[in-house]
Amino acid sequence: MYTSHEDIGYDFEDDPKDKKTLRPHPDVDGGWAWMMVVSSFFVHILIMGSQMALGVLNVEWLEEFHQSRGLTAWVSSLSMGVTLIVGPFIGLFINTCGCRWTTIVGGLLNALGWVLSAYAANVHCLFITFGVAAGLGSGMAYLPAVVMVGRYFQKRRALAQGLSTTGTGFGTFLMTVLLKYLCMEYGWRNAMFIQGAVSLNLCVCGALMRPLSLGKDEGHPGGKDMQAMPAPSTESVRSGGQLGSAEEKDSALGKEGTICDLQAQECQGQAPPRMNMCALRVLKTMSQITLRVRKGFREWYSGYFGTASLFTNRMFVAFIFWALFAYSSFVIPFIHLPEIVNLYNLAEQNDVFPLTSIIAILHIFGKVSLGFVADLPCISVWNVFLLANFTLVLSIFILPLMHTYAGLAVICALIGFSSGYFSLMPVVTEDLVGIEHLANAYGIIICANGVSALLGPPFAGWIFDITQKYDFSFYICGLLYTVGILSLLIQPCIQLIEQTRRENTDGSQA
């Protein structure tokens, strides 16, 4: 999605005519690329999995702080929402620092948020320590994990992304069991402290995100490193003009370094050597950092705010409107199901096999199955996407009617399987805006999903505080979700009507 000084996918070579050609990097689609899949898989487990298991902690926070359900739900929704909303802005860190250091810093910040939350005196402290701090750290670690898989894979990108994102389902299942066990044995505060230590493994995942190395140009005198070009991917789409400007900036950066070297040679005989060299090194470092930050900011700004043409696409605007309601329908059951189980006196059965774990397991199968069906030549991806959405919204409407464990388990299975359409979102987005705008458009969709995750759970809790039932929360949420789905059908219906009118007009003229 972003271009940075670490984005090296192809190496330049000089041919006999001094023309630069592209040689595929040996690690692309193999070798260390599969380590990127492993790293991204564990990032999904530690971040998305733990967030989907926050319903366990939500019950503990309600008992500890005795606040309203709407206010308490803000803690979980803030963490989920911030993780996705800051996605477009994390690109600035990726452009300047690279994916490796962005992930490492994000892992440290995420772990710090968990640890500080263990000492929270009230819910408002959790807003800052867990909602904002841990959420920001999660966003800094999550986005590079997706980006690096796209950089390392060309031919098998869909398979690699699919394997890495299954970590969400596995993580939800594992983290639900882990947090439940830790809360029972050590209390929720110590459980969060331990989870903070576990989150430090994000730094290990970041360390595995090795940038694709620069190749040596053997035909160039002295074996000097040549400039390299990032590997094109669905997560790093750029237009031809933007690539040209990036190359010019890279050459300017190289010239700046050469000028500094010449200045160092000229000044060595005019000042004390040690002081002169130290000063020149500091100046050179500051100059390079300044140029890198300016370059990263320009690329980030042009990538997200230079795409106003996207908003002239009516279907894409409708897709954003859909995204504002979609994610909350998937998140709300994870946050409030543990408490619903307690209200229905189903805690013993739920402890044997949690309902959230059923959603997580079927979510994995849903991603794989829906992706396989959508790839069939006779099947439309758009139709599969809409059918999965209708199934999910229908499940949301039916869930409040179920008061037995078996009934809730069936509905949770439907929710988990139908929510597998998230694996189709990049494909649908590409169909709407084209591959040249895929990265920027998908970033905007993720940000809209973050807004949905931010507002959905507190809204459901607020409705419960008024009605003392979760039934209306799911009904209203399902109704809003239905409005979002219908917005996707408006433009195709208009096009169909216009096409019918043209055919009728042409027929009458003939």
Image (cartoon, helix red, strand yellow):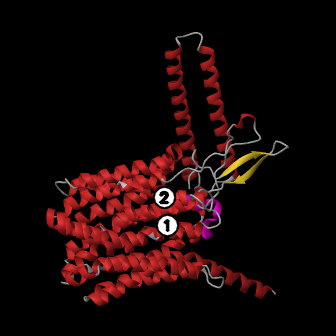
**Viewed as shown, does residue 453 lie left or right of 2?**
left
Query: Are the residues tagged 1 and 2 within 8 Å (C-beta)?
Result: yes
- Circle 2 is placed at which residue position? 145
Q: How many marks?
A: 2
The amino acid pointed to by label 2 is Ala
Could you give the CA–CA distance between mark 1 and mark 2, rounded to whole angstroms? 9 Å
Q: Which quadrant is the C terminus positioned in?
A: bottom right
Q: Main secondary structure of the magenta part?
A: helix
* Dot 2 alpha-carbon crowd within 10 angstroms: few under 14, some 14 to 19, many 20 or more: many
The percent position of residue 508, horizontal first and vertical second, equals 76, 88
Residue at screen point 34% across, 65% down: 51
| Residue nearer the viewer, 196 or 126 | 196
Disc number at residue 164? 1
The percent position of residue 164, horizontal first and vertical second, equals 49, 66
Q: Which quadrant is the N terminus positioned in?
A: bottom right
Bounds of the magenta span?
A: 429-440
The percent position of residue 73, horizontal first and vertical second, equals 26, 66
The numbered mark, 1 or 2, whose residue comes first in the sequence reads 2
The percent position of residue 260, horizontal first and vertical second, equals 60, 24
